Amino acid sequence: MRTPAVLSVLGEDRVGIVAAVSNALAESQVNIEDIRQTILSGIFSMTMLVTVDEETVPFEGVQARLVEVAKALDVQITLQREDVFRYMHRV
Amino acid sequence: MRITPEEIAETLTMVTQQNLDIRTVTLGLSLGDCATDDIDVMSTRIYDKICRCAEHLVPTAKSIAAEYGVPIVNTRISVTPIAQLASACKATNITPLAVALDRAADTVGIDFIGGFSALVHKGMGDGDRRLIDSIPEALASTRRVCSSVNVASTRAGINMDAVLRMAEVVKETAQLTADRDSIGCGKLVLFCNMVEDNPFMAGAMHGSGEADAVINVGISGPGVVRAVVASLSPQADLTEVAEAIKATSFKITRAGELIAREAARRLGVGMGIVDLSLAPTPAQGDSVADIIEAMGVKRCGGPGTTAALALLNDAVKKGGAMGSSSVGGLSGAFIPVSEDQGMIRAAMTGALTIEKLEAMTAVCSVGLDMIAIPGDTATETIAAIVADACAIGVINSKTTAARLIPAVGKSVGESVEFGGLLGTAPVMSVNEWAGTGFVRRGGRFPAPLNSLRN
């Protein structure tokens, strides 16, 4: 099952955030479909639209891997199923 | 259409800073097939059925919350009104069935189970009577069981004999749990026009018009709405306030609808309803009173409160009705005094009185909720307060309820501490000119003319 999801990263800017997050996603067979990233007053903010291949790595497996990355980078990372955004913001 | 970063940021802010959550995922479960004439066998069947059917409830709710990034605060179960099962046996004490419910709730890992209930708005059957007689002991000897009794309806009027009997039961329950600030009464609600699909405690039960098992969901608490109202300019007019609440209600109802569908799908049961009630908790900011004050009322309970609450309740329904095709349950703001920091503050300062709460009952769902009153309040006075709340519901064809706690050994100025979600309640003063003679007349308060609709 291929599940669309939204990944968001928020934290102090530093070298290697995009690299570390993308690496972790690649290892988990998560495909990146769109990336938007900005830095506002030193705060790194990135949202990614991704597709999780749950047959290879289950959703919670990807989340667990991202928790490790978030700890190592000291940033906040959330991965949520895309439906929640579609439901809340589209009639 | 793709989701925009602004929409993503808004949702994340709602979760991380404004307490967007799902207040409850409640499994409604029929226990009709557990009925038998031997109460011990019935207890075993009830325990086994709940444990079997609800085995995956808590783990499923946990995974959904993690995957969608929306916290699910409570996971609960509502069951067939136990009075219906009580009528199948001859036991005079129905407490063993409450104990079975309590054990099952513990095993499946939920904090409350609702349905130790009876519907006696027109008359009281033998099973109903035995259940009602057992309520004080049942609530004193269990932790998770909630009880509710429907004593009035628009179609039947008010069963005043039942109201007076339930006032006695409230007093007995207070007495039996006197060592814990009469907490038993916090788990006992008296209803007018009770609904069959309410997911919220303490009044949840699984009605006879429902399927065998169903998932009902309660939307996010008042925190998100308060944040939106507080962010408006003080010059924003009331149409703008209503519009902002409506838009927020739509979003939180959509989140509720999504979680309800997904929980129902994963558990292999039907989706029931999304309940639009804003249910406060003792957490800071998670308060209906704070929304009323953010709208511009100096202190909840002051003049303007009823109008503000009516506007809030209506706007939440308008946004919510658009967000879900299965709106149901109580779907009206809750104003429990002990569970809402703003209500507690208002009651402590004297701004909020029982009479004002009664007026507020007319424009929200369950008005007289979690109100501590002096332990020596007369049974007839309690019955008269309940009759007033019921009359509002009967005449206006709406649900009303009363959850009063006559705190044994306590008087006005003191407070009761229940801890956890049930909170803290200041003991409020009761008008001493009660309709004692009125409630002692008993009989049935006739159904109003507007019950004749056919």
Image (cartoon, coloured by chain):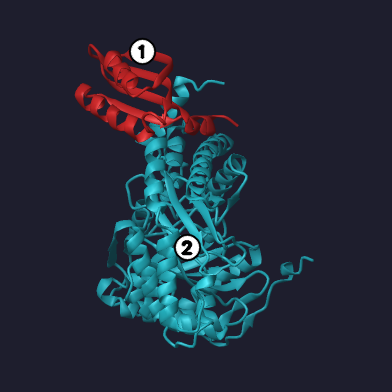
Q: Amino acid at mark 1?
A: Thr
* Mark number, residue B175: none
Q: What residue is at 36 percent from the left and 69 percent from the top?
A: B102
* Mark number, residue B78: 2
Q: What residue is at 55 percent from the left and 59 percent from the top?
A: B197
Q: Amino acid at mark 2?
A: Ser
Residue at the far front in the pictured view? A56
Image quadrant where one finds the C terminus of chain B: bottom right
Do marks 2 and 1 share a subunit?
no
Q: Position of residue B192 (x, y in %)?
A: 57, 69
The hue in which chain B appears in the rendered picture of the protein: cyan
The alpha-carbon separation of the residues under discs 2 and 1 comes to 48 Å
Question: Counting other residues with Cα less than 10 Å from the Cα at mark 2, is it few (<14), some (14-19), or many (20 or more)?
Answer: many
Q: Position of residue B393 (x, y in %)?
A: 60, 65
**Considering depth in this image, is B342 or B118 the residue closer to the camera?**
B118
Q: Nearer the viewer, mark 2 or mark 1?
A: 2
Seen in the picture, residue B355 relative to A46 is either above or below; the reply is below
Q: Secondary structure at mark 1?
A: strand
Q: What residue is at 40 percent from the left and 57 percent from the top?
A: B55
Residue at the far left in the pictured view? A72
Q: Secondary structure at mark 2?
A: strand
The hue in which chain A appears in the rendered picture of the protein: red
Q: Is residue A46 left or right of residue B442?
A: left
Q: Is residue B400 left or right of residue B40?
A: right
Image quadrant where one finds the N terminus of chain B: top right
Seen in the picture, residue B361 relative to B152 is either above or below; the reply is above
Please give the residue where the numbered disc 1 appears in the rendered image: A38
| Residue B188 visible in this rendered orientation of the protein | no
Seen in the picture, residue B238 relative to A16 is either above or below; the reply is below
Q: Position of residue B64 (x, y in %)?
A: 41, 42
The disc numbered 2 marks a residue on which chain? B
